[in-house]
Structures are given as C-alpha cells and as structure tokens.
Amino acid sequence: MPVHRRTFRLLLAGAVTLALGLVSPPAGASPGEAASGPTAVARARVAADQLMSSYEPGKAWFPSSWWNSAVALQTIGDYMQRTGDRRYLPQLDNTFEKDKGAFPAGYLSGDELLGNFTSRAIDDSEWWGLTWVQAYDLTKNPKYLDMAVKIAEYVEGYWDPSTCGGGVWWNGERTYKNAVTNGLWIRLTAELHNRMPDDTRWLGRAQEGWNWFTKSGMINSAGLVNDGLKDNCQSNGDTVWSYNQGLAIGAGLELWRATRNPALLTTVRRLADAAIAPGGLVTDGVLTEYCDAPGRTCDDNGKQFKGIFMRYWTDLADTTHDSRYADFVAQQAATIWDNDRDASDRLGERWSGQTPNVFDWRTQASALSALLAAVPATPPIRSLSATTDPALPVVMPSASTHVKVTVDVQATGPADQQITANVQAAAPSGWTVTPTRSSVTLTTRGNAVPVHAAVQLDVTIPAGAADGTHSVTATVTSGPLLSYSTRSDILIAHKADFDTGTSAETPWLYDADGSQSNGVQNRFADGHSYFVYRFPFPADAKSASVVLTIDNEFAVQLSGDGQNWTTVATETNQYHDGQNKADRTFDLTPYLGAGKAGYVRISDSFPNDGWGGRVYHVTATYK
C-alpha cells in the first residue's frame, strides 16, 4: 500500500467531529435532542469522510463487496446532494470509468461481471443503476444516465410474466422472485422516466412493476414486506428486512412523482406506518434489523439494510412533510450520534449502541444515511467543524509520555468570509496539554469544499497513569453562540487483550485494509487483503510477544516500523473449516527499541481460493 494512502486513511479514521453553524445546540442539551441544521451537516461530513477513508482508488470500490460498494457510493452521492459538499465527485467518476468493463469472477464480485455494471445478480445490477442516476443528478453528465438506461435494459430481459404473472427474477438462473429485485426495478424505472422528457417506456415498466408487486402477496396483512415468493407463487413469509420495506416506500414515492396518483401515497403511508408500528421494525424507538437482536449478527449484506431504509424514509419525510416521519428521522440520527459512535466517529451496526457492536465501512454507510436524513432539505451554507488526529491513540507506558494531537478545524460559509475559531483544550487531572488556548482564522469558499486550519496539541501523560481510557477534549467556539466539544480518547494499557470484531480491537487496529469482520471473534483477510495491529511498546521494554488465536489459510508477518516485514508463519494446507484453530505465539522482542513498535500483519496464504487468515483473539505483552 502506498504511504500516502495509508496516511490519508489514518487521518480520516481518527476524525472526531465537532459541528458548529449559525445556531449551536443549547448548552446542556439532553441526549437524543435533534441537532441544528449546521450541526447535522457537519456530523454528516465527518461520517462521510470516515466512510471514504475505506474507498480503494485502485479498484475504485469499497473492499470485498460489489453491491455494497454501489450502495456506499450512492450514499456518498446523497451526502453531496444533501449538503452541497462536492469533494467526492472524482471518486464517483473514478469508479464509473474503471469498473464499467467486464471482469472475471473473484476480482470485484464473486460473480463474473458482464460489463456496464451487470452480472447474473440482477439486484446487484439494479443497485448500480440507481448509483448512476444519482451521479447524473449531481453532475448532469449524460454518460451516467446512459449507463443507468443500459442497466435497466439488461434487467428488463428478466421480467417474466410466464411465472407468477410477472416480476423480475432475482438471478440469471431464474430461480427466485423477491422483494428487493422488484422494489429496485420500480424505483429505477420511475427514476429514469422522471429524468427523460417524453418517456413512456420506463413509466410503463414502473407502473407494471408496481401493480404486480403490490398484488404479489409479498406485502403481508400487517403492511410489512416479506422477502419473496415460493415456487407456488405464494409469499414465503420470510424475514421482513428493513431494506425491502424501504425500497417499497421509495418505489411508490418515485412513481407518485411520475403520476401524482394519490392512491400511491396511500399505499406508501401504509407501508411506512407499518414499519414504525408495534410489531414492525422499531425497538424502543430505534430502527432495528432482525439480525441486530441479541445473540445474532448481521452479515455483510445485512449491515447496510437499515441505511437503505433511511434513504427512502428521507424521501418520505421530504415529500409528505409529516411530522411523525420527520420525528422518526431526528430520533434515529440522535440515537446514532449519542450511542453508536466511537471516539473516531465510526458508526456501528447496532444503532442503539447495544454491545457487542460491529464497525466497518458498511455499517458506516448505513448509519450515514440516517445522519443525512437529519440534514435540512435546504442545507445551511455556514458550518464549523473540527477533528482530532489521532482520536484513539494507545500508550503502553513505562514513564512520562508525550502524545501529539492535531485539531483540524473546518469551515464552510459564504465565499471570502472570515471565521475566527477559538480552541480551548483540557486534559485529565495530573496531565498537561499545551497550548490550552489558541485560535485560527479561516476564509470560507462556499459549502462545496470546506476550508481547514490546524492546531497542534502536546499532551503529557504522567508516569503511573492508570490503565484505561482518558479523554483530552478540545472545545471550539466562534462568537457568543457557537460552541461544541470533541475529544481524543487515549488508551493507557500495559497489555493488549481483545476479541476481534469489537470496539476493544479498534485502538490496536493500525491498518484494516480490505479485511472483514463478521461479528465478534471473526476478523479475516481474503485474497490480497490483510490487516495490521500495532503495539507501541515502551523503548525500554526488554521483551515482548503476541498470541494470536488464528485459523484457516493465514500468513503472519512481523515488523518494527510497519514497512519492512518478516514472515514468521504460513499455513501450507488449504483449510476452510477452522480445523487448524490454535493459539500461536510470536516473539516481538527483535522489533523493540526507540522509535519502533511491534507490528503484526495477517494475510492470506492462498489468495486465489477465498479462505484467508482469520483471527479470533489477540494478546500482546511486554516486560
């Protein structure tokens, strides 16, 4: 990985927002209170930056997931459209140009990609169609709309009235008709119609799809959308996933914009009201996926379902101006910000904050959609935010230690207007932070691109500081009304001892690369992906070691600088079932010394078969 990319990723991964604008939240505002417009914009901005820190410019996607990448990019498109920030247009175009061709199975998708973002997975193709409609809305470049049309024409070939009277098949083998594929079809064709003057073709397809879908039986008697149809064309009564409910709402709304038929809004409201009614998709006021329940874990697909629901719920709130729907938006956004956000502004799978929680780019994209829903439809031009880097530093101490923290202040506002922001820093008792007060002046350039100014803080940690997390805060103010605080959570630890896939892993995870984490004790790296842990042992440590609970097809490398690696273990058998799971100990003593740390990198010893190294638990100690 090039150094510049790693630096960019770590900078954004350490981002912690403090959002300021025309009006700040009142002092002492209670948790869950709706954010002001400028605050909502800045929160969304930081969450979007965190999401884009996982974007891989080489392959032009988010690692290891094809359809999920389409949804994440569409969410970034939503962000740019909702806030006016246009910094990520180049990444959208990078993906369009690099990934529109044909690719073999295993390169970007488990399926062969046929070109024009199509494959045997019909729903995957449709997700990309919606992504390029979003890009067209942002840029008005016809190439994006042309691509969406090509995708729709491909999908059209899988509409089949000979089975169950209609509907689009879920896959190229024509084995299943389900809610997601048909909800996507209606939304995509209605979007095309609403952007193509004098169109009748796509409007006809959207109306035909809606009529079939609403009569298919997939919408049950409670107004909830089951997953699909059985071979006998009856509803299978399968799980009500939030994204199916959201897509049905979104499909009806876009078709209503095309026809203004009031019956469509009646059905949409029924679907929406069912979602938030008792027995629907809400637990204690929080949108909750079936797999969010205790004892369950969402797979990489399920991690993004709630965000899709919120994307179309935002459309519902904007279209109807119903306060009930707007209140639901505010509650989800506030819940995420208060309960589901770690110190680096990563947003997790369980919006209630219930543990164990999972954090990755998919959960980030999902929760970002809820934060975007809280941004006013006409966003404020002025906002002020700041980030800290690092947000989650780790210190393994032996004596007094210094940590450098950068506060990066960002502002948007009318062109050529100056904003002075005062920064006040504070540290725990017995610690010192310098300077305690400073100020920066920023000249804004509108809301398309935030401007930046940095303040450097030096934090002195006293010898004997207790193990645990200690917060250094930075409060930024501008004028008498604007004030907001952020923090850098410094972890003091004499050993590392954590399960993978948990928040306890985060401070130690130096570089996640394209690795994945499907729940607790399950971080793995397939193909050419890897992940790296960093252990900042003190310079006077005499010995150090790390114990990995690991299995499958792993390769383990060690380093003292994170650049030069020594391979210390390679699995030579092609294990796919965890039968080689064991605790393995590796000596990090040769990598100790001033300016060094212990780096452990896990990758795939058989990168072509999709069963890379999997780590369950990590323990690192020193003497």
Image (cartoon, rainbow, N blue to C red):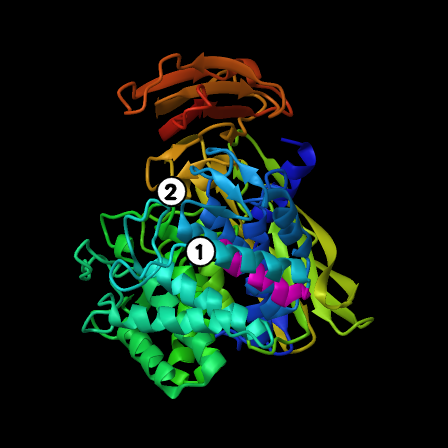
Say whether residue 573 is left or right of residue 435. Answer: left
Identified at 62% across, 40% down, the residue is 403
Q: Position of residue 17 (x, y in %)?
A: 58, 59
Residue 485 quadrant: bottom right
Q: Position of residue 190 (x, y in %)?
A: 48, 71
Q: Position of residue 615 (x, y in %)?
A: 37, 29
Mark carried by residue 347: none
- How packed mark 2 is, by other alpha carbons closer than 10 Å (few <14, some 14-19, many 20 or more), is some
Q: Secondary structure at mark 2?
A: loop
Q: Is residue 23 one of those drawn in magenta?
A: no
Residue hosting label 2: 502
- The image shows residue 156, relative to residue 205, as above or below, that is above
Q: CA distance from mark 2 to mark 1?
A: 39 Å
Identified at 59% across, 21% down, the residue is 560
- The image shows residue 430, relative to residue 414, as above or below, that is above
Q: Which of the two discs, 2 and 1, sits closer to the camera?
A: 1
Identified at 59% across, 23% down, the residue is 539
Q: Between residues 341 and 269, which one lies in front from this camera angle?
A: 269
Residue hosting label 1: 155
Say whether residue 252 is left or right of residue 257. Answer: left
Q: Amino acid at mark 2?
A: Thr
Q: Is residue 14 visible?
A: no
Say whether residue 414 is left or right of residue 537. Answer: right
Q: Amino acid at mark 1?
A: Val
- Give the extent of the magenta segment: 128-140
Q: Between residues 89 and 214, which one lies in front from this camera angle?
A: 214
Q: Position of residue 580 (x, y in %)?
A: 29, 18
Q: Between residues 227 and 24, which one lies in front from this camera angle?
A: 227
